[in-house]
Amino acid sequence: MYNGKCTISARLRRDRFRLCAYRSANNNYTLSIIHYQLIKRVDIIKKIKAAVLCGVLLLTGCGHKTDEPVIAPASAAGPASTSNKSSSITSAPPNSSQKPRSSSSSVSSYSPTAANVISPLCKADALYCVEDGELLYGENSDVTIAPASLTKLITASTALKYLDPDEVCTVGTELALVQPDSSLCLISEGQQLTLYDLVAGMLLPSGNDAAYSVAVNTARKVSSSQLTDEQAVTYFVDLMNSLAQEIGMKSSHFANPEGWDNDGHYTTAADLARLGSYALSVPVIRELVSTPKYNTQFISGEFIEWTNGNKLIHPESDYYCKYAVGMKTGMTDNAGCALVAAFEYNGKTYVTSTVGCTDDRERYGTTLSLFNRVCPGVYTEDSETSSE
């Protein structure tokens, strides 16, 4: 799609429709409409306006040189679903100070931008044996990709490296850093809960709100300083990158704790498999990622239930696999549908990573096909799973 010398993209405001014009190698122009995660109907007037804008850009000769692969500008969708069906909160006892979270949090100056990864929506995957420390298979496994919410595995690993899971954390104004349309676990400012609970809210329903609270609470406790929210996030991200290097993620760099698409936020499928292997060595993470549903009461009194977004561990799911022991889903514009999964079979543990999928069927199908390489018969093209 990006073989021409010039690419120009006009983004329609609230929908996920792109109208693009391309200049080919022989300077001929082609105008096309790209449907990208369409979530709202686009009326004809908006299409016409976008077409006029593209025409003006073409006439003026503006564009993006394609000396490197081109990424059409986009506003990333938050990792995982934003409907919050996987989170439910029960009112706290009468003496609780629970506060409702505003649905329109203002974003501070700490504002990530679209990722400049080498291959947006690149289909990449990897299969890794934990015990042997060996990458068994990979397709585009060393290509730079966006990690989406798979980032939360390194976020959780970093926090638990420095703090005890029973450490008491307070949710604060860092919630203002959460991007619009993010997936949430529905924590609120002023609530108090253990780090264990906070990590659960980050890993199971993929709460971006929990990711920022984990980052800020950890940074302030480790630094023993009253850092601002932005300073605390920067401090914590440095800890994330240090740990990534320690565990062999040599082709990765992180810019935020939740996985929002960003220029400096990238990894590879091979590195994600290594991350999954390390995360399984952390008892709290290994326990939580294998938990289908989690119920708890916060220290401040609120009751909550979270559902794990990984369909591999839900017996009622079409993608259920009895060998699966958990891990993490993710989704952004640049990462597509992504998944790091772990399986136990014949005394060994295998970690798979896949990114760049278009939907759940491809995401879970690719994952099970990878595991099928070491456990023949677990998945066939004609049926979703056959793990019996």
Image (cartoon, rainbow, N blue to C red):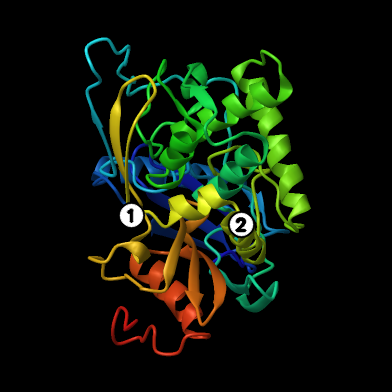
Query: Disc 1 residue type?
Result: Pro
Q: Which labelled disc corresponds to residue 211?
A: none
Give the quarter of the figure containing the N terminus: bottom right
Q: Residue at x 64, y 53 (%)?
A: 117
Q: Decide: few, some or many residues near mark 2? Use Cα within 10 Å; few <14, some 14-19, many ≥20.
A: few
Of callouts 1 and 2, which one flags the residue occurring earlier in the amino acid sequence?
A: 2
Q: Give how far apart the Cα atoms at labels 1 and 2 are.
A: 19 Å
Image spot of residue 338 (x, y percent): 47, 60
Q: Residue at x 68, y 29 (%)?
A: 234
Regarding mark 1 in the picture, which secondary structure is present there? loop
The answer to whether 110 is drawn above or below residue 140 in the figure is: above
Query: Disc 2 residue type?
Result: Ser
Q: Mark 2 points at which residue?
A: 281
Give the quarter of the figure containing the C terminus: bottom left
Image side of residue 270 versus residue 344, left or right? right
Q: Mark 1 points at which residue?
A: 292
- Quarter of the image for residue 226 reads top right
Does residue 314 show up?
A: yes
Q: Decide: few, some or many residues near mark 1? Use Cα within 10 Å; few <14, some 14-19, many ≥20.
A: some
